[in-house]
Image (cartoon, rainbow, N blue to C red):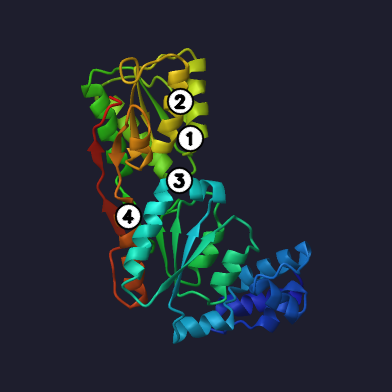
Amino acid sequence: MSTDAMRHTQRGAGSAHAVTIEEVAAAAGVSRSTVSRVVNGSTAVSPEALESVTRAISELNYVPNRAARSLASQKTHAIALIVPEDTTRFFGDPFFAAIVSGINSRLSRSDYVLNLFIASDDPGDKTTSYVRSGAVDGAIVVSHHTSDTFIDRIASVVPVVYGGRPVRERDRDYYVDVDNVRGAYDATVYLIESGRRRIATITGPRDMPAGVDRLQGYRDALAAWDLDEIAVEDGNFTADGGADAMRRVLATGARPDAVFVASDLMARGVLTVLTAEGLRVPEDVAIIGFDDSPVATSVSPQLTTMRQPSFAQGERMATVLLDLLAGRHPRHVTILETELVVRDSV
């Protein structure tokens, strides 16, 4: 960065001075109009200019005027729901439908409207630019991964409430989660108390707190009963991923008599593979899923599963954010309980 740009950086970082769009342009070595296009999410910007402007905005901690005015005195009465997943995952997983329904139910009793963003981790993405422009008053983030660093840039401008424990938890964060560790523990213990001893697990992604926590609960239960892990495979919280993970378990030569599966979607894939291999559920292999989504009752045999209150989680996230926007002081952490629902797969 040039000496002039460094002076701008020091000036923006070391005082209460409100950084201007002209200073960002000078720091990035581009025109004012180029900075404006980046801020407003335009794609008519070269990759080099986009990188320079994004870096200058971050280093100067620049907040667009519209956002500054909104935070100071005005309200847009709009909330962003940001889901860092692809569209196939979002529309294919009943969990998201329940979460959105809960959020919408709470917002319907307020003056706020909901804007949905299915986002990706792109430093110049439209979601980040849109939120930073002051177009919304706050954001709810659901299902984020370790790689989703763009969330920090959003959280520096508007209040954010997370659905699930954030990947990098800080004292200032607000989030609503379910007790994933306890839910997985209870599911695994139920399998053990049903007489199963060779229990495998199909996990969610290890870069997501829900995936990590459900694996921990499984391991805690085995340790409490002095049992060994038979197999642990990542199923990516999808039906195809669950099927692939189950094939990998069987390919190792492991012959589990039970599987704790960290989502119902993955459990559907597991059931498909076990059936194709001529293994009976629950006679040969018992299965417990997680979610109690419509998937659990659409398969045969119907799934025993851990019910997580996804609709209530959505409602609570919206309530926490509305409290923040109203100047109230909600709890930083809300943990909802899970419940075992016994059906035919154990």
Residue hosting label 4:
311
The answer for how far apart the CA atoms under marks 3 and 1 are is 9 Å
CB atoms of marks 2 and 4 within 8 Å = no
Residue hosting label 2:
272
- Badge 1 marks a residue whose secondary structure is helix
The answer for how far apart the CA atoms under marks 2 and 1 are is 9 Å
| Upstream in sequence: badge 3 or badge 4 | 3
Amino acid bearing label 2: Thr
Image height check: is 84 above or below 181? Answer: below
Local packing at callout 3 (Cα closer than 10 Å; few below 14, some 14-19, many 20+) is some
Amino acid bearing label 1: Ala
Disc marking residue 93: 3
Amino acid bearing label 3: Asp
Residue displayed at 44% across by 87% down = 73
- Badge 4 marks a residue whose secondary structure is helix
- Residue 178 in sight here: yes
Residue hosting label 1:
239
Where does residue 46 sit, x and y in percent of width and height? 78, 65
Q: Quadrant of the C terminus?
A: top left
The answer for how far apart the CA atoms under marks 1 and 4 are is 22 Å
